[in-house]
Image (tube, rainbow, N blue to C red):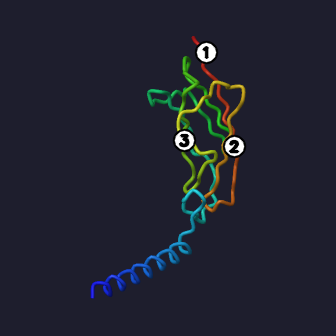
């Protein structure tokens, strides 16, 4: 009797699991990162921030140009450029490539950094370039 109950339970569990997989795959498409693909075409950076080791902003001024796809950031005098954490505010459902995984070295300010912003529907891609300058002492 117990073997029969176990067999019925295993069969029902298998059927339920298969139905969940089939239904969820079609209703909610996801990309290679496991993020939901939506119908949104917006693709832009809303704001940008660089955090120092103390997790406070090191930016004196910043301008995000969504037409030219450029970010111009002036950092405070004395900023340690070797350990900064970039943070982006993106349009809804967008993602960024390469991914930001932690502290980054920005000490070579002569070489602008680039990130690609990808829309929610994954069809629109815009490359943003970050230009950094550092305030001079008074």
Which mark identifies residue 136? 1
Answer with the quarter of the image where residue 30 lies: bottom right
Task: Return the residue at label 3.
Answer: 101
Q: Residue at x 57, y 29 (%)?
A: 61
Comparing 45 with 55, the one in front is 55
Callout 1 crowding tier (Cα within 10 Å): few <14, some 14–19, many ≥20: few
Indicate whether 12 appears above or below 94. Answer: below
Residue lying at the far left of the rendered structure: 1
Indicate whether 48 appears above or below 27. Answer: above
Indicate whether 93 appears above or below 47. Answer: below
The quadrant of the rendering that contains the C terminus is top right
Indicate whether 73 appears above or below 27. Answer: above
Comparing 47 with 32, the one in front is 32
Q: Residue 31: where, in percent of width, then height? A: 60, 61
Name the N-terminal-most of marks 3 and 2: 2
Which mark identifies residue 69? 2
Callout 2 crowding tier (Cα within 10 Å): few <14, some 14–19, many ≥20: some
**C-alpha distance separating marks 1 and 2:** 26 Å
Q: Nearer the viewer, mark 3 or mark 2?
A: 3
Instruction: Say whether marks 1 and 2 touch (CB < 8 Å).
Output: no
Instruction: Say whether marks 1 and 3 touch (CB < 8 Å).
Output: no
Name the N-terminal-most of marks 1 and 2: 2
Name the N-terminal-most of marks 1 and 3: 3
**C-alpha distance separating marks 3 and 2:** 22 Å
Q: Residue at x 60, y 29 (%)?
A: 105
């Amino acid at each position: 009797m117990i073997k029969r109950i176990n067999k019925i339970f295993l069969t029902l569990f298998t059927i339920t699991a298969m139905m969940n997989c089939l239904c969820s795959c079609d209703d909610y498409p996801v990309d290679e990162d496991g993020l939901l693909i939506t119908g949104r075409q917006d693709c832009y950076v809303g704001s940008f921030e660089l955090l120092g080791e103390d997790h406070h902003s090191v930016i004196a001024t910043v301008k995000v140009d969504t037409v030219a796809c450029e970010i111009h950031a002036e950092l405070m005098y004395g900023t340690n450029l070797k350990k900064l954490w970039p943070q982006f505010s993106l349009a809804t459902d967008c993602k960024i490539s390469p991914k930001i995984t932690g502290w980054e070295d920005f000490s070579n300010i002569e070489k602008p950094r680039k990130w690609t912003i990808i829309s929610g529907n994954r069809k629109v891609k815009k490359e943003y370039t970050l230009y950094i300058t550092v305030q001079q002492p008074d």
